[in-house]
C-alpha cells in the first residue's frame, strides 16, 4: 500500500473561544532520510479558514490552491464568506474524486464563522468534525496531551501553549517530526502566523 510510505509529520488543530490554532512541525522525512528541515505545513485557505497537513506536502499545496480558487469563485457568486464546513466538504469532494490515485495527505481544516470549527480529513476525503485533532506519525503522542489537557473555551494563549506542548511531545518520540513549529491562528479578523524554533519551545 502507498500509505505505508507516506512521509512522517505531526500536525494539530485546537479550537478556542475566538478561533482556532493550527500547528505543525517543520521536518520532511522519508523513511530514514530527513529530506528538509524547514517546510511549512500550515496554510491559510481563505480569510477565515486555514489548514494543516501531514503527508505529502506537494499534494497538500495542490489541494489548497484548488480549494482556495474554488472558494474565491463561490464568494464572488454568493457575496458571502465561505464557511469552514463548506471548505472541508469541498476538500473532501476533491480528495474523493482522486480516490483511485489519492492525494497522500491527512488534513486538519479549521476556521471560524459563527463559532470555531475543526475538521479532520483522511486521504480519501472522510470529514470528521471535532473540537481538536492531530494527524501524522506523531498523532498518538500529541493526542495523549490533547485528551488530557484540552478544555472548551480556552484562550488563544492557552490553545497555543497546548499545541506547542502536544507537538513537542510528538517530536520527543517520533523521529520523523522536528526542527521547529509553525503556528497559524485563524479568527474573524483573519489569519496570523508565527514560527517557533527548537530552542524557543524547549524552554
Image (cartoon, rainbow, N blue to C red):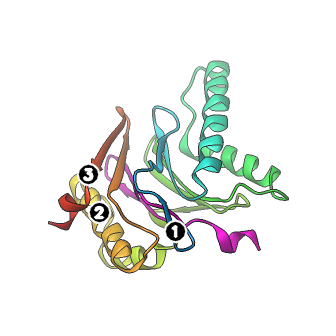
Comparing labels 2 and 1, the label whose residue is closer to the camera: 1
* Residue for badge 1: 33
Check if mark 1's residue and mark 3's residue have beta carbons within 8 Å.
no
Q: Residue at x 61, y 48 (%)?
A: 58
Whole-percent x and y of residue 164?
29, 63
Q: Residue at x 38, y 77 (%)?
A: 147
* Residue for badge 3: 156
Task: Characterize the local packing of mark 2: few (<14), some (14-19) or many (20 or more) Cα atoms within 10 angstroms.
Answer: many
Q: Which mark is residue 164?
A: 2
Whole-percent x and y of residue 29?
51, 65
Q: Quadrant of residue 174?
A: bottom left
Please say whether residue 30 is one of the residues in the magenta stretch: no
Comparing labels 1 and 3, the label whose residue is closer to the camera: 1
Q: CA distance from mark 3 to mark 2?
A: 12 Å
First reached walking from the N terminus: tag 3 or tag 2? 3
Q: From which residue to which does the magenta span run?
A: 1-29
Amino acid at each position: 500500500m502507498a500509505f505505508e510510505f507516506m512521509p512522517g509529520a505531526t500536525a494539530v488543530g485546537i479550537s478556542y473561544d475566538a478561533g482556532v490554532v493550527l500547528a505543525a512541525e517543520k521536518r520532511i522525512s522519508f523513511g530514514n532520510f530527513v529530506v528538509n528541515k524547514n517546510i511549512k505545513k500550515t496554510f491559510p485557505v481563505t480569510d477565515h479558514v486555514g489548514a494543516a497537513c501531514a503527508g505529502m506536502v506537494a499534494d497538500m499545496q495542490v489541494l489548497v490552491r484548488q480549494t482556495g480558487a474554488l472558494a474565491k469563485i463561490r464568494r464572488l457568486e454568493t457575496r458571502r464568506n465561505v464557511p469552514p464546513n463548506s471548505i472541508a466538504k469541498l476538500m473532501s469532494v476533491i480528495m474523493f474524486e482522486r480516490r483511485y490515485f489519492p492525494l497522500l495527505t491527512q488534513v486538519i481544516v479549521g476556521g471560524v464563522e459563527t463559532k470555531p470549527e475543526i475538521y479532520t480529513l483522511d486521504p480519501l476525503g472522510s470529514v470528521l468534525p471535532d473540537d481538536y485533532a492531530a494527524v501524522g506519525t506523531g498523532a498518538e503522542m500529541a493526542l495523549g496531551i490533547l485528551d488530557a489537557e484540552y478544555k472548551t473555551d480556552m484562550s488563544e494563549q492557552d490553545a497555543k501553549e497546548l499545541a506547542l506542548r502536544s507537538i513537542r511531545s510528538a517530536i520527543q518520540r517520533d523521529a520523523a517530526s522536528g526542527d521547529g513549529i509553525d503556528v497559524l491562528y485563524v479568527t474573524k479578523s483573519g489569519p496570523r502566523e508565527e514560527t517557533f524554533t527548537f530552542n524557543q519551545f524547549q524552554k
